[in-house]
Image (tube, rainbow, N blue to C red):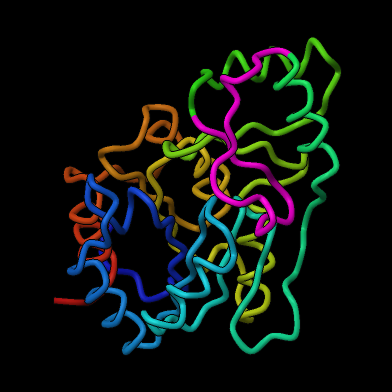
Amino acid sequence: MPFNPKFQVLVTDVDGTLTSPQNRLHLPAVEAIRKLEDQGIHVVFCSGNIMCSLLTLEFYLGISGPIIAENGGVVMKLGWDKPIILGSKEQPLKALKVLKETFGDRIMEVGDQFYRFTDIAIRRTIDRENLVKTMKENNVEINVLDSGYALHLCDPQVHKAIGVRKAVEKLGYKSEDVLGIGDGQNDIELLQEVGYGIALNNAPQVLKNVADYVTEKSFGEGFIEAVKKFFNID
């Protein structure tokens, strides 16, 4: 698919997409983001990470779009009075209680949950399928998303697509105007929601299966490959 100017918004994951394998920001990816913004393309960060981390990136990288945190549960932009909360933490807390009762010390939370509004992140010490099975056996409605860095216990209605819809609406566009890039299982709904979805080569096969295009390169280099193919930047 050649360069198509109809894409006015780029929604991208962060960890594993804008970073190196060591999870450091890939500086050429940062440069590409600045070039896109200079051309009037709205860049939106969409991540399982917490709101304050993404707002920091928004400030220092100078993106014009809102940020989407907690896998779609929170949409926010610097200058807004308050975040848009699209989920509840009630079910994730129930899920966490069941998991700790079932797996004990193997369940370890990631970071300070005080900064999370709609989900709970835990270390990947138990495979996702086992967690999903445990939730079903205990009649706990929960969405378990794997970012590749943590497992996220989310409100059953929360995934990246709902955050994309709200963020794009705030920008005055529709999902069909969006190009999306991701690298994790938690990016499936993101790629399905947008007008054109790209999976990086380091993504799991389940994400590649729903992508319109899969890059040859991985991590930040894959991001560069994608934006150079689909946007008019050097």
Magenta run includes residue 108: yes
Q: Position of residue 137 (x, y in %)?
A: 79, 10
Q: Residue at x 53, y 18 (%)?
A: 126
Q: Nearer the viewer, residue 111 or 40?
A: 111
Magenta run includes residue 84: no
For the N terminus, the image quarter is bottom left
* Label tally: 0
Say above or below: 3 vs 206. Answer: below
Q: Residue lying farthest front? A: 105
Q: Residue at x 28, y 64 (%)?
A: 230
Q: Nearer the viewer, residue 72 or 140?
A: 140
For the C terminus, the image quarter is bottom left
Residue 148, located in which quarter of the rendered image?
A: top left
Point out the stretch of residues depicted in magenta.
Answer: 102-123
Q: Position of residue 62 (x, y in %)?
A: 40, 84
Say above or below: 30 vs 224. Answer: below
Say above or below: 191 vs 14. Answer: above
Say above or below: 198 vs 33. Answer: above
Q: Position of residue 220 (x, y in %)?
A: 23, 56
Q: Is residue 70 shown left or right of residue 196?
A: right
Q: Is residue 184 shown left or right of residue 111?
A: left
Residue 105, located in which quarter of the rendered image?
A: top right
Q: Is residue 11 shown left or right of residue 165?
A: left
Q: Residue at x 20, y 68 (%)?
A: 27
Q: Residue at x 21, y 45 (%)?
A: 218
Q: Position of residue 74 (x, y in %)?
A: 68, 62
Q: Residue lying farthest left? A: 234
